[in-house]
Image (tube, rainbow, N blue to C red):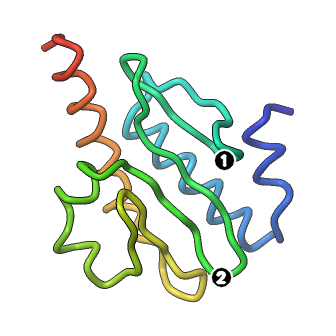
Amino acid sequence: MDPVETYINTFPAEVQTLLLQIRATIVAAAPQAQESISYGMPAYKTEGKALVYFAGFKHHIGFYATPTGHSAFAAELAAYKQGKGSVQFPLDQPVPYDLISRMVAFRAQENKENSGKK
């Protein structure tokens, strides 16, 4: 079993389902991303730079797309509790997978542009 699966399997079944869907959403939006565990949570990189992270908690899922990834989607994220570069998606509300997909794609493009590639 890979490290991300091991991480996800530490959560109750209903949370595992959400985490697996977030993982699939990230991979679909950035198939070139390298997956690992960093800072104790699933982490993704493109162009050798951080892309996004996610983590499960008792009452929410944390999603981390760096400050630029969050500022670009500030209006859509306004309904959620946030920190600098982080957002909390409550477990008792639908997870906005489409928004996550768009944030990942935005960050992947940002990493590509910052690497000098077109």
> Hey, which quadrant is residue 80 in on the image?
bottom left
- The answer for how far apart the CA atoms under marks 1 and 2 are is 16 Å
Image spot of residue 10 (x, y percent): 86, 58
**Residue at 78% over, 35% down:** 3
- Residue placed furthest toward the left: 118
Left or right for 32, reference 6: left
Q: Nearer the viewer, residue 9 or 75?
A: 75
Q: Is residue 77 above or below residue 117?
A: below
The residue singled out by tag 2 in the image is: 59
**Crowd class of label 2 (few under 14; some 14 to 19; many from 20; radius 10 Å):** few
In the rendered image, the quadrant that contains the N terminus is: top right
Left or right for 27, reference 78: right
The residue singled out by tag 1 in the image is: 41
In the rendered image, the quadrant that contains the C terminus is: top left
Left or right for 79, reference 52: left
- Residue placed furthest toward the top: 117
Amino acid, disc 1? Met
**Residue at 65% over, 54% down:** 20
* Secondary structure beneath label 2: loop
**Crowd class of label 1 (few under 14; some 14 to 19; many from 20; radius 10 Å):** some
> Hey, which quadrant is residue 111 in on the image?
top left
Q: Earlier in the sequence, mark 1 or mark 2?
A: 1
Image spot of residue 32 (x, y percent): 43, 22
> Hey, which quadrant is residue 9 in on the image?
bottom right
Q: Is residue 27 above or below residue 16?
A: above
Q: Nearer the viewer, residue 94 or 73?
A: 73
* Secondary structure beneath label 1: strand
